[in-house]
Amino acid sequence: MTNYYLDIETTGLDPKESKIITIQFQKLDRYTGKPEGDLVILKEWESSEKEILSDFIEMTGIINAEDDFNFVSTGYNLGFEHNFLKERTKINGLPVIDILNKPFIDLRSIGILMNSGQFKGSGLDKITGKKSDGSNIPNWYLTKEYQKIIDYILNETEEFLFFNSWLYSRMPELLSEFKRELD
């Protein structure tokens, strides 16, 4: 089983109308949730959406019918990535990426539970040190402020990885505590 942090940035919220402008991923240690290796950022403005999708498929082997565990997507609100990757691969005539129909780890549910079960206020920018939400990305893309997008991605990745590894270290304790209460 190989876990990978996975995130994308887009020009909007509608996968039929908006395009993917970055795909970022990084291998994670299976037992600690900490990063292994470098963060890869595929940038549409250096090639095309079709090319970054194609590169992502080739580099990761995410579409591997023989082994659903070769790329276990790990992220925050993976439904967003799922909808975009599935729709945009179809539109670009590529094999369809369907991340929610294979093993995945989505920390959004934990964020909601940590926020007293409330969806509002459970964004990664609300529960970690992430500096902002992604609402500025489309404007930065239009004005070609690509470094601002990269800086946003780096901050988001750092905060996600810290949260992920923190949960890996704390959740076994929570399970032990829960089991003690069952007795």
Image (cartoon, rainbow, N blue to C red):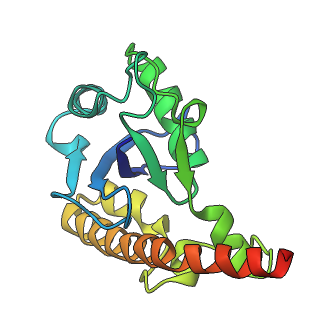
Q: How many marks?
A: 0
Question: In the displayed structure, does residue 33 sit left or right of residue 124?
Answer: left
Question: Residue 164 falls in which quadrant of the image?
Answer: bottom left
Question: In the displayed structure, does residue 178 sit left or right of residue 23?
Answer: right
Q: Quadrant of the N terminus?
A: top left
Can residue 121 be seen here? The reply is no
Question: Residue 137 falls in which quadrant of the image?
Answer: bottom left
> Looking at the picture, how far across and down is residue 174, in whole percent?
65, 79
Q: Is residue 86 above or below residue 80?
A: above
Question: In the displayed structure, does residue 5 sit left or right of residue 26?
Answer: right
Question: Residue 160 falls in which quadrant of the image?
Answer: bottom left
> Looking at the picture, how far across and down is residue 98, in whole percent?
52, 28
Q: Quadrant of the C terminus?
A: bottom right
Q: Residue furthest bottom?
A: 129
> Looking at the picture, how far across and down is residue 119, in whole percent?
75, 70
Q: Is residue 85 above or below residue 183?
A: above
Q: Residue at x 20, y 51 (%)?
A: 40
Q: Residue furthest front?
A: 183
Q: Is residue 117 above or below residue 59?
A: below
Q: Residue at x 29, y 64 (%)?
A: 149
Can residue 134 be seen here? The reply is yes
Question: As rendered, which of 23 and 167 lies closer to the eye?
Answer: 167
Question: As rendered, which of 160 and 19 lies closer to the eye?
Answer: 160
Question: As rendered, which of 6 and 45 lies closer to the eye?
Answer: 6
